[in-house]
Amino acid sequence: MNKTKTAIVVIFVIAIGCYFIFNLGQYLTLEYAHSQLGAIQVYKDQNFASAALIYLAVYVAVAALSIPGAVILTLIGGAIFGLGWGLLIVSFASSIGATLAFLVSRTLLRDWVQSKFGDYLAPINRGIEKDGSFYLFSIRMVPLFPFFIVNLLMGLTPIKTISFYIVSQIGMLLGTAVYINAGSELAQITSLSGLVSGSLLFSLALLGLFPFIARSIVNSSQRNKLMKKFVKPKKFDVNVVVIGAGSAGLVASLIVAGAKAKIVLVEKHKMGGDCLNTGCIPSKSLIRSGRIMSYLRRSEEYGINNGSGDVDFTKVMEQVQAIIKMIEPHDSIERFTSLGVECVSGEAFIESPYTVRVGDRVINTRSIIVSTGARPLIPPTQGLDEIDYLTSDTVWGLRELPKHLLVVGGGPVGCELAQAFNNLGALVTQVDMESRIMVREDPEVSAAVTEQFAKDGINVLTDHRLVKFGQDDGQAFMEAEHQGQTVRVEFDKVLLAIGRKANVEGFGLEELEMPLTPKGTIEINDAMQTAYPNIYACGDVVGPFQFTHMASFQAFFSSINAMLGGLWRLKAKYNVVPWATFTDPEVARVGLSEEEAKTRNVNYEVTRYDMDHLDRALADREAHGFIKVLTVPGKDKILGVTIVGYHAGELIGEFVFAMTHGMGLKKISAVTHIYPTLLEANKFAANAWRNARLPKKYFPWTEKFFRWHRK
């Protein structure tokens, strides 16, 4: 405990001790106020300034120490100073005292509370950061809430001190005036219970709700103002128009059609979107081909001599397209038409919240769902327009393996494709401006992948900032700045994989002046609703998680809310979000990483199980990696899981299920897993948590018991 905290605790203990030892509470009673009122008024008439200062100091001390008695002091203030001066003095005294109590709570308790319960408090913290002043103002206007509790609780939140003081000063003014006014008749008050009428308290409570009501009215007014610009059709052609037939749009369309509502799905390019055509499916197919080649190089480990193979890169890329063709029927126009979805090919344009134009056709719709996805982000780098660069969209057109491939970006896409091309025989250099690749994961995860990349022969250049691209006598090159030095890398092809940009241009959002986030995605609420009440959005175009499974997750809420049309709203909660990076070793995670837990001041315990102990991993000669589980201290509640190793993306599923349904490690430990399987690793990780908490101090006694039992 630092000196400041120690001093506060000492002062607090002394003050509270004096309060009880000297029975100071007797001076904060209605009886004592009646008995001393005349003398106090005489002193005030003779020494107004000193009386006001003494009264203010006493009030501040009582409020700062959270001692019951503020109501009596407020009444006395009204009786002594009258409505005008009384309101002025009490208003400042109560606000100053409340702020001191707030600061005491913040100094002594906030760090401890946030570290212990940070995960649970995260939604509250975000709400306070966004609308803390609004909520505090509403509470301050309702005298039914004990103000000293409000002071202490608000001290645990991120609200700024100056905001707390100003809002308290204004918010408590009306309630203070009521009690000051009542205090002017203190001689006639015989009981605090009869101080103000029930109807008055009820009116004040309603007044406290006024900001919420007003906010709702303002929001509704703003939305109505937006909608008034457009003519609402007397009749609608369909219930929902979905723009974009990627993962989010397809799932939303199936849900709407499944409910027997009329729907039109508009796609300007290919059904299936990025996931089928340029993302998940082709990349995993390419990774598989590369993985097979890596096994051929390792064949002697498995007792197979002279294992070899030649890469026919053209055939590799053709089989990638063949797999896309195999899956294509699942997302085809024919299938969705058979399920009740009207599929329209063409470019959609939102003319109004009620109308979407596709070519010459105008569709009147009750709701619109925007699921237009995202595209590779192209950095504004000097000379980039002079070279023939690749992205995750265009790389699938390659039919000749690059001799030297430069991959720009150390995220999941960059890492997956860098290793896949390296396995297929390309010389790969990977460059990233961050200090390590896979920066969203814990450092030990990045280190495990980096170590494998080094074994594979991938040249990883981190902490390198792009400066320019260019060509020198037909040789493409990149220049980057690293620790003040210029680094030059020559290459045949460059793949840009530094992120994705939401597709929000060219189909009417600009004309609607649709609000966007600082990241360029469509701004939505937790019901997937945009600024326009009947326009919803989901998937990569809104984020924050650009995963196919999260697009499907958001599509559920978008479709249900779009069909209900405001009658009821389902709100999405991102409590359990899993993802995987399909490198070798694979990396999978759900919930918090250690780095995130530290950043958010979430207290945690770590349980780790190393895969080199697992029989199936040893049998498959894939005994590397680990499972790391973060739990609530002293409990088996799972905060997050990171898995690095063979088939991590499959293993994570059991933990995702457990977290989704509120199960802890004890439940996983109690499950029988087939031997020998990789899935046993999850049970062993759970057992490791239990073993670390065995009551070992009692073992000597049990040993004595069993020794006696053998006699």
Image (cartoon, grey):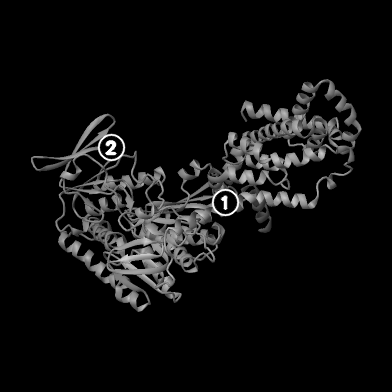
As drawn, the label of residue 215 is 1
Count of picture labels = 2
In the rendered image, which quarter is residue 615 located in?
A: bottom left
Q: Secondary structure at mark 1?
A: helix
For badge 1, the amino acid type reads: Arg
- Furthest toward the right, the residue is 35
Q: Is residue 89 left or right of residue 529?
A: right
In the rendered image, which quarter is residue 432 located in?
A: top left
Up the image or down, 655 lies above or below 333; here it is: above
Q: Earlier in the sequence, mark 1 or mark 2?
A: 1
Mark 1 burial class by Cα count in 10 Å: few <14, some 14-19, many 20+:
few
Mark 2 burial class by Cα count in 10 Å: few <14, some 14-19, many 20+:
many
As drawn, the label of residue 117 is none
Q: Give the residue at x 25% y 59%.
A: 286
Q: Are marks 1 and 2 in contact (CB under 8 Å)?
A: no
Residue on which disc 2 sits: 464
User: Can you give x and y, in whole percent of width and height, for residue 381 in the image?
Assistant: 24, 40
Q: Nearer the viewer, mark 1 or mark 2?
A: 1
User: Can you give x and y, in whole percent of width and height, for residue 425 in the image?
Assistant: 18, 53
CA gap, disc 1 to disc 2? 48 Å
Quadrant of the rendering where the C terminus is positioned: bottom right
Quadrant of the rendering where the N terminus is positioned: top right
User: Can you give x and y, in whole percent of width and height, for residue 645 in the image?
Assistant: 37, 54
Asked whether 408 or 680 is in front, the reply is 408
Q: Secondary structure at mark 2?
A: loop
Q: Is residue 23 left or right of residue 466?
A: right
Q: Give the residue at x 15% y 47%.
A: 492
Q: Is residue 531 left or right of residue 294?
A: right
